Image: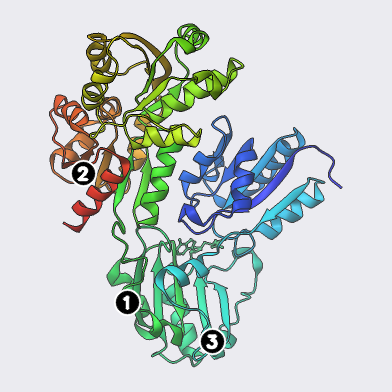
């Protein structure tokens, strides 16, 4: 029985594609007070946890692995004893070469309550994303997972290479990249034919996945020539022959493209998931964070008089959400909106209204403030209009509508600079500059471009990093920084940006 209210979840994060986390794993992440994560875990998963959760990367605990591990266990136990919900997020599956067994045992002995959530192990991800069926009725009835990195403290090595060489099925070698010079001769020496088909899958399931196909005897040399690195798996066996020239994953339209997403919060994550599914390596660097407005008083006052307005005008999905939440906070609900007509700047804003079962009465043909102002104008003559927006919005709507209507403008949220932006950017430039940066508003463009250092700006000037703008206004913001965009999305939506990205990626 557990002796504390805290709990530890040993969660398999999957092999790299964030979409491969299980729903149970996601539930645990959302609950977590503290997350201890491995270096190989896709970091965007951390953004699904509460913003106030504590996140500790294992490499922060100490430089050397053997020293780090007892420290990690100590910290996990202390957190759980303090009543915290702890998630130990591990690459792949916790019980496949992941020390999950030892961690669970230590927790058990310490009387800590725990749960184990499996993950997609690297071998199975490599199989699916490189299209190498590890079993096949005609070619392999068994599959063996083996480590190429024996625990040095064990004394005698426990991998029996002679037996492994004699196995007829598929062999998947984990952690073997640095030891191929010893492993391959051992297998050959024990009679495994040099002609055995071999594949190496690097970064399985990620946008930067690479596959190499060869035979066992040529494996070390081929790996060296192709410059393949960890994390990689070696797959040996007849099933390797079944692999198509290019797997479905490697044929994806954005495969391997490193795309920087500067949108904050849930919207950034939603965009990342769309891009990841197309094969991109999404890099999250929110340029601005969403925060409550400096004062709720004007908003609450407008809500108190909401029946007086003929039109409510929304210029962003965030604005819709913040407004409706405040309405409910004030003890009202959607019935309070009564007869007011609703305008939305574009389909995303209208979609957010739709999520509250509200239909937009007006969406302009082009999703920019100028078009919204022009199309609204004939409808609002003599009317009373409430403009619901961000604190730092543009003034064009107000100025235009004021010529015909009584307009009140309220700020329902604020965009704050992200204090960690520079840090996030330098992570996005490693190991190479991002190929694309998606600029989804002029505010985001200003915040992001201001935060770039000289070498980062240099990669834009040299064309290594291309800027993609959502609209003319954003493009103009880019020009103010003496930079140019590689393209402007039409329609001015996320889907428009993704379509443009695919077009540019095709060359
Ligand atoms: N628990 C993990 C394995 C950890 S051992 C799992 O179930 O997948 C680390 C080894 O896993 C690496 O050396 C590499 O061989 C393999 N690995 C992990 N992620 C990988 C990936 N995305 N692509 C290829 N191999 C990977």
Confirm or deny contact between disc 3 and disc 1 (CB under 8 A).
no
Task: Give the residue at x 26% y 50%.
Answer: 499
Q: Where is residue 332 in the image (x, y as percent from the top left)?
A: 59, 18
Q: Where is residue 358 in the image (x, y as percent from the top left)?
A: 47, 31
Query: Within 10 Å of the Cα at label 2, are there few (<14), some (14-19), or many (20+) other Cα atoms?
Result: many
Is 454 or 394 nearer to us in this picture?
394
Residue 379 percent across, percent down from the top left = 28, 20
Res. 458 in view: yes
Q: Is residue 87 left or right of residue 383?
A: right
Q: Is residue 97 left or right of residue 342?
A: right
Residue 265 can be seen, yes or no = no
Q: Is mark 1 on a helix, strand or loop?
A: helix
Label 3 sits on residue: 169
Q: Is mark 2 within 8 Å of ligand 1?
A: no
Q: Identify the residue position indicated by label 2 in the image.
A: 465
Instruction: Answer above or below: position of 131 versus 81.
Output: below
Local packing at callout 3 (Cα closer than 10 Å; few below 14, some 14-19, many 20+) is some
Q: From the viewer's perspective, is the residue at label 3 or at label 1 nearer?
A: 3
- Residue annotated with mark 1: 221
- The front one of 167 and 356 is 356
Residue 244 position (above or below residue 274): below
- Answer with left or right where residue 197 lies relative to residue 297: left
């Amino acid at each position: 029985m557990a002796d504390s209210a805290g709990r530890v979840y040993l969660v398999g994060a999957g092999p790299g594609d964030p979409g491969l986390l299980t729903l149970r794993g996601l539930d645990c992440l959302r609950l977590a007070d503290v997350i201890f994560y491995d270096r190989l875990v896709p970091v965007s998963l951390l953004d699904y946890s509460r913003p106030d959760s504590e996140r500790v990367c294992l490499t922060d605990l100490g430089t050397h692995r053997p020293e780090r591990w007892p420290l990690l266990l100590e910290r996990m136990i202390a957190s759980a004893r303090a009543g915290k919900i702890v998630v130990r997020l591990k690459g792949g599956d916790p019980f496949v070469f992941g020390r999950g067994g030892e961690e669970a045992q230590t927790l058990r002995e310490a009387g800590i309550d725990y749960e184990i959530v499996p993950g997609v192990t690297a071998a199975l991800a490599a199989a699916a994303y490189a299209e190498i069926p590890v079993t096949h009725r005609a070619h392999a009835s068994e599959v063996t997972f083996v480590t190429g990195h024996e625990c040095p403290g064990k004394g005698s090595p426990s991998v029996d290479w002679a037996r492994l060489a004699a196995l007829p099925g598929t062999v998947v070698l984990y952690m073997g990249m640095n030891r191929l010079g010893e492993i391959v001769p051992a297998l050959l020496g024990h009679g495994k034919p040099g002609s055995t088909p071999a594949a190496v899958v690097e970064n399985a399931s990620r946008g930067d996945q690479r596959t190499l196909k060869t035979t066992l005897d040529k494996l070390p040399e081929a790996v060296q020539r192709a410059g393949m690195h960890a994390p990689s798996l070696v797959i040996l066996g007849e099933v390797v022959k079944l692999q198509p020239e290019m797997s479905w994953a490697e044929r994806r339209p954005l495969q391997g493209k490193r795309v920087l997403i500067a949108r904050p919060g849930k919207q950034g994550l939603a965009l990342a998931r769309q891009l990841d599914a197309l094969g991109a390596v999404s890099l999250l660097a929110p340029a601005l964070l969403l925060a409550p407005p400096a004062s709720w008083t004007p908003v609450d006052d407008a809500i108190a008089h909401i029946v007086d307005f003929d039109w409510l005008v929304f210029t962003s999905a965030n604005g819709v959400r913040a407004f409706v939440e405040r309405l409910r906070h004030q003890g009202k609900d959607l019935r309070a909106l009564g007869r007011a007509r609703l305008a939305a700047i574009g389909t995303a804003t209208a979609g957010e209204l739709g999520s509250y079962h509200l239909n937009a009465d007006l969406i302009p043909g082009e999703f920019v403030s100028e078009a919204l102002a022009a199309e609204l104008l004939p409808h609002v003559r003599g009317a009373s209009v409430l403009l619901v927006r961000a604190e730092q919005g543009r003034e064009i709507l107000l100025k235009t509508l004021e010529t015909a209507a009584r307009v009140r403008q309220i700020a329902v949220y604020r965009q704050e600079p992200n204090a960690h932006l520079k840090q996030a950017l330098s992570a996005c430039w490693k190991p190479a500059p991002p190929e694309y940066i998606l600029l989804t508003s002029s505010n985001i463009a200003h915040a992001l471009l201001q935060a770039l250092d000289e070498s980062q700006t240099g990669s834009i000037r040299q064309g290594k990093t291309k800027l993609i703008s959502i609209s003319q206004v954003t493009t103009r913001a880019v020009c103010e920084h003496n930079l140019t965009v590689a393209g402007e999305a039409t329609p001015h939506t996320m889907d428009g940006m993704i379509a443009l990205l695919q077009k540019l990626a095709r060359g």
